[in-house]
Image (spheres, grey):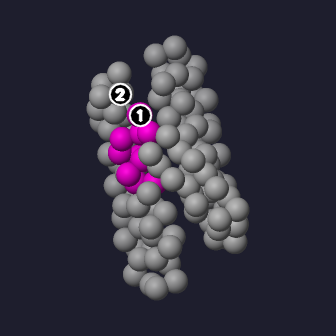
Amino acid sequence: MKLVGNILWFVFTGFVGGLVYFILGLLWCITIIGIPFGKQCFKLASLMFWPFGKKIKCDFSSHPIANIIWVVFGGLEVAVGYLILGLLWCITIIGIPFGKQCFKLAYLSFIPFGAKIS
């Protein structure tokens, strides 16, 4: 199921979303101050390409200031977008696995600093 889910996700959602996060990561890395934020965009891009079968462990307390800055400058809007997209996917029974992946992305996009993807 992971392979089929990842292939379908990549075709319908993951390629464009992952590419956007990758480009944003490159843009953030232009400045020295933006490098930590660029690294988080790369983390989101890797999960966006192949989310099925991956687990997220978040530790907000390891980087609270960076997470707060992330939330203020766009993390909240992105997380709400993924929540809405996940709810739309969950309308049908076939879309529930994709909705669950959107909820995983919402969680990571809200507080990415200190998160580990395994």
Over which residues does the magenta segment extend? Answer: 44-54
Does the CB distance between marks 1 and 2 fall below 8 Å? yes
Total residue callouts: 2
Residue appearing at x 65%, y 68% in the figure: 63
Q: Position of residue 116 (x, y in %)?
A: 51, 53
Residue appearing at x 53%, y 45% in the figure: 56
- In the rendered image, residue 2 lying in the magenta stretch gets the answer no
Q: Position of residue 76 (x, y in %)?
A: 66, 55
Residue annotated with mark 2: 2
Specify whether residue 76 is in view.
yes
Q: Position of residue 42 (x, y in %)?
A: 41, 61
Frontmost residue, 45 versus 95: 45
Neighbourhood count class around disc 1 (C-alpha, 10 Å): few under 14, some 14–19, many 20 upward: few
User: Looking at numbered disc 1 in the image, what kind of residue is underneath it?
Assistant: Gly
- In the rendered image, residue 45 lying in the magenta stretch gets the answer yes
**Residue 68's quadrant in the figure?**
bottom right
User: Looking at numbered disc 2 in the image, what kind of residue is underneath it?
Assistant: Lys
Residue appearing at x 52%, y 14% in the figure: 93
| Image-based side of 40 in relation to 61, left or right | left
